[in-house]
Amino acid sequence: MLEQQESQILVVFPHPDDEAFGVSGTLAQYANAGVPITYACLTLGEMGRNLGNPPFATRESLPEIRKKELQASCEAIGINDLRMMGLRDKTVEFEDDEKMVQMMTKLIDELNPSLVLTFYPNYAVHPDHEATCKAVVRAIRRMKEEDRPRLYCVAFANDTVENLGEPHLINDIRDVKEQKIGSMRAHASQTGWMMQEEEKRKEDGDTESHNWFTEEAIYIYDWNRDFEESF
């Protein structure tokens, strides 16, 4: 459990399952401690490539499936305030930049979070990830420094450690392992194969959990090395 006390957490990711892979264990710890968490998920991941083999979904039915998976993931974590923001998957990068900043500003103004969690700009790989976290950073940058929430980020580009160094925080989540597994399992349309591999490893006698289920790596956004000078 991270030691810093929080009054309100805002999580901003573009896709259902983004929360599950990166920070669901950390969020579960905060939720178990009674910290209110709001998750703003920008899309329903309706353009996800995995429709199953044989298909379990069509392109038309996938949004509702992923919506229910997202709700189940939040329930597993302990998130009670889920905001589905209504943007379209794989088009977030084409949204008007100022519109995106204003969306984040409204959330921050409403919630007054002490901590915001998103991806790290330029180290988030997917265009929707990048557009999302850049909007978050831009919104926070406009605030007075003394009023800014702390900004924790998930980074997983190949050059992350080379350029950013080792993660600032490695959070031990073994105490909420089952909640993390529950969150990932909820997104069955996207993580089914992964969870099957984990079960097979256990059946084969491998008792060591994948590090996804034991620790989560977090970067603290470095305002002295901002991804852009201004916007």
Image: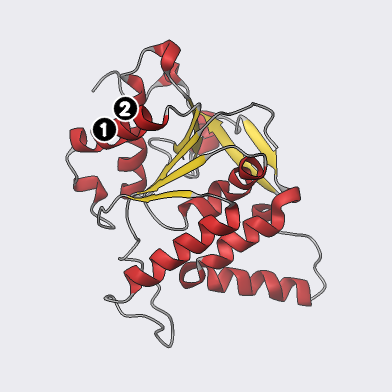
Q: Is residue 174 above or below residue 168?
A: below
Q: Earlier in the sequence, mark 1 or mark 2?
A: 1
Residue reaching furthest left?
96
- Left of 214 or right of it: where is 16? left
In which image quadrant can residue 130 be found? top left
- Left of 26 or right of it: where is 119? left
Q: Nearer the viewer, residue 136 or 36?
A: 36
User: Is residue 137 in view from this perspective?
Assistant: no
Q: Nearer the viewer, residue 58 or 38?
A: 38
Instruction: Give the residue pinned by disc 1.
Output: 101
Residue visible at 35% across and 35% down in the picture: 107
Residue reaching furthest bottom?
54
- Label 2 amino acid? Ala
> Disc 1 versus disc 2: distance between alpha carbons?
5 Å
Residue visible at 81% across and 65% down in the picture: 207
The N terminus lies in quadrant: top right
Residue visible at 59% across and 37% down in the picture: 35
> What x and y, as percent, mark residue 80?
51, 50
Looking at the rendered structure, the secondary structure element under dot 2 is helix
Looking at the rendered structure, the secondary structure element under dot 1 is helix
Q: Is residue 85 above or below residue 217?
A: below
> What x and y, as percent, mark residue 164?
51, 29
User: Is residue 149 in view from this perspective?
Assistant: yes
> What x and y, as percent, mark residue 89?
29, 58
How crowded pointer 2 is (Cα within 10 Å; few <14, some 14-19, many 20+) is rated as many
Instruction: Give the residue pinned by disc 2.
Output: 139
- Label 1 amino acid? Val
Q: Which mark, residue 82?
A: none
Q: Do residues under tags 1 and 2 come within 8 Å of each other at their CB atoms?
A: yes
